[in-house]
Image: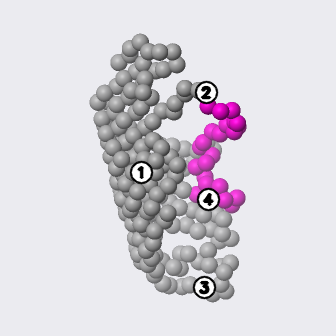
Amino acid sequence: LLSPAAEGTVALRVDGGKATISELRLQVPGEKQPLWRIARIGVAGVGVDGPKQQVVVGEVVVAGAQGRLRRERDGTLGFARLLRTTAASSEPAAAGTMAWQVAIARSALQRASIDVEDLVPEVPFRTRVSELDLRVTGWSTARGQRAQFDGRARVGSGGRLAVRGPLAVNPLAGRLEVTLDAIDLAALQPYLDPLVAVVVTAGKAAAKGTLD
């Protein structure tokens, strides 16, 4: 709905909006393989309040996502090429301006997989993260707002990864419990080569800790 508003504001209000996107593909120009394939994205309970500059979403579900994550030789991440950057500015924000706030009550990533490639080691490291399920509650761009993350995935042929805990994005802060189990040590050889003059032919590792 549109209604009269003061100068500089958006007089738009939406309640109960929903949308679905199917068979989405994202591709880097010049590359043959898609960066991401997503079978379905469902969004429900969308509310937009223009005068307050707020977007509230009840639920977001991303199902069947398949992607690639690559670190280049210079240490940069491949997806950084998708982001358009602008020159940094020392100009202060105009008085009275306010950034839009986005809040998502519940979101889920279901049955996702990511092919990971690291080109920094002399021998590139490659693995696959599959069966990735992630649930997030209470996510928001509001300052200091922490969401609850709970994710699990398979790493390589038989390793397992679990991450759980609160995380905020404005500013970035959190306390995540990370659990690794049955991680193939032989697959980590590219990172061991500069440190030791031995070759790991077999072995499994498990670890548990907290990231602050």
First in sequence, mark 4 or 1: give its number.
4
- Amino acid type of disc 4? Arg
Mark 3 → mark 4, Cα distance in angstroms: 24 Å
Distance from the alpha carbon under mark 4 to that under mark 1: 28 Å
Query: Marks 4 and 2, how far apart in space?
Result: 37 Å
Which residue does the image show at 61% across and 27% down from the upper left? Answer: 94
Find disc 3 in the rendering and name its residue: 199
Please state which amino acid type lies under the numbered disc 1: Arg
Is label 3 in contact with label 4 (beta carbons under 8 Å)? no
**CB under 8 Å between callouts 4 and 2?**
no
Q: Is residue 136 left or right of residue 73?
A: left
Residue at which label 1 appears: 146
Q: Which residues are magenta?
A: 70-94
Labelled pair 3, 1 in contact (Cβ < 8 Å) = no
Q: Secondary structure at mark 4?
A: strand
Relative image position of residue 110 (x, y in whole percent): 35, 53
Q: Amino acid at mark 2?
A: Ala
Q: Which mark is residue 94?
A: 2
Image x and y of residue 20, in percent: 34, 36
In the image, farthest residue toward the bottom: 198
Within 10 Å of the Cα at label 2, are there few (<14), some (14-19), or many (20+) other Cα atoms?
few
Closer to the chain start, of discs 3 and 4, is: 4
Q: For mark 2, give the secondary structure.
A: loop
- Earlier in the chain: of badge 3 and badge 1, it is 1
Q: Report the mark closest to the observer, 2 or 3.
A: 2
Residue tagged 4: 71
Q: Position of residue 30 (x, y in %)?
A: 63, 44
- Of badges 4 and 2, nearer the viewer stands 2
The residues bearing labels 2 and 1 have C-alpha atoms spaced at a distance of 28 Å
